[in-house]
Image: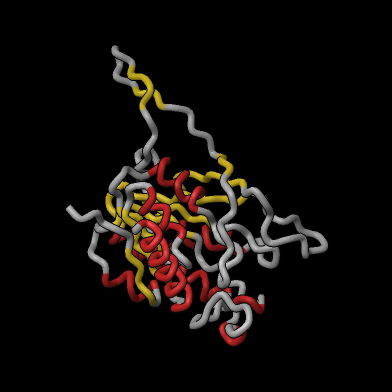
Amino acid sequence: MTEKKSRIFCGDAQIILKTFERNSIDGMITSPPYNMGKNPRHRAENHADVSLYDSYVDAMSDKEYISFVVDIFNILDSLIKEKGIICYNMGSSTKMASLPFRVIAAILDKTNWTMGDVIYWQKKTTMPFQTSPNKASPLVEPIYIFCRKGDERDFIANKKVTKINSSTGQKFYGRVVNHFIAPNGISTSLNHATFSVEMVEELLDRYFLVGSVILDPFCGSGTTLNACDQNGRIGIGIEISGEQVDLYLTLQRKHKLTED
């Protein structure tokens, strides 16, 4: 049997997600665009020098951005399987510290998703560097675990049973805390603030069985897909930047040549 490998689609997540089969995804791991278009690195018109996006301007109004996220979550409700979860790494920008909380409030109010848990990723180094005169650079970032409303007590997880009470059948699980340490992602020519394969591996181990299909609709240069390939899961990625997709495919070809 041919081993199933991760796949990447180039285009707008709002459009491509609507072409996927219902109940075809076990869960999602992603870090979304932060809507930081006032930063020159995020502007398409500066693409020749330092932009993250060659075909997308990460500069919606707050209202437009929140509506965009809500639409994505509503689409996901039909794609993610029963009891499935969304692992959503959205740290706060030093310029817009309130935006993640407004996004979360809209998700809770306007979608079928609610907060199942929050865990915290401690990076090895802070990003961005100390450029603000009054704000701390984030060393720890939250990862919001969204489940459907009503699934708060039994959403999917991969915790290990360590003991079962023979009289009552009560299960006891191995200790899992809401904090872990993993390195920053490897910087590429297009993206200097990524999460790492090790960070994704931690989430895969905590929540998803081997063979699970994991979606990343904002997959950049493919960290989630690489982690899935290395850990027996199947990654499905969407990325609007053609340059990011080309970089992912180039690195995949180089890796295959090295293996061969």
Residue 116 or residue 231, whichever sits in front: 231
Q: Could you tell me which residue is drawn at 24 percent across and 54 percent down?
A: 3
As drawn, the residue found furthest toward the left would be 1
Looking at the image, residue 38 lies above or below residue 24 = below
Looking at the image, residue 159 lies above or below residue 248 = above
State how the image is colored: secondary structure
Q: Could you tell me which residue is drawn at 70 percent across and 63 percent down?
A: 94
As drawn, the residue found furthest toward the top would be 167
**Taking 242 as reference, is 196 left or right?**
right
As drawn, the residue found furthest toward the bottom would be 45
Q: Quadrant of the C terminus?
A: bottom left
Q: Could you tell me which residue is drawn at 23 percent across and 62 percent down?
A: 22
Q: Quadrant of residue 155?
A: top left
Q: Position of residue 53 (x, y in %)?
A: 53, 78
Residue 225 or residue 61, whichever sits in front: 225
Looking at the image, residue 157 lies above or below residue 45 = above
Q: Position of residue 248 (x, y in %)?
A: 43, 68
Residue 60 appears in the figure: no
Residue 7 appears in the figure: yes
**Taking 249 as reference, is 121 left or right?**
right
Q: Position of residue 134 (x, y in %)?
A: 81, 60
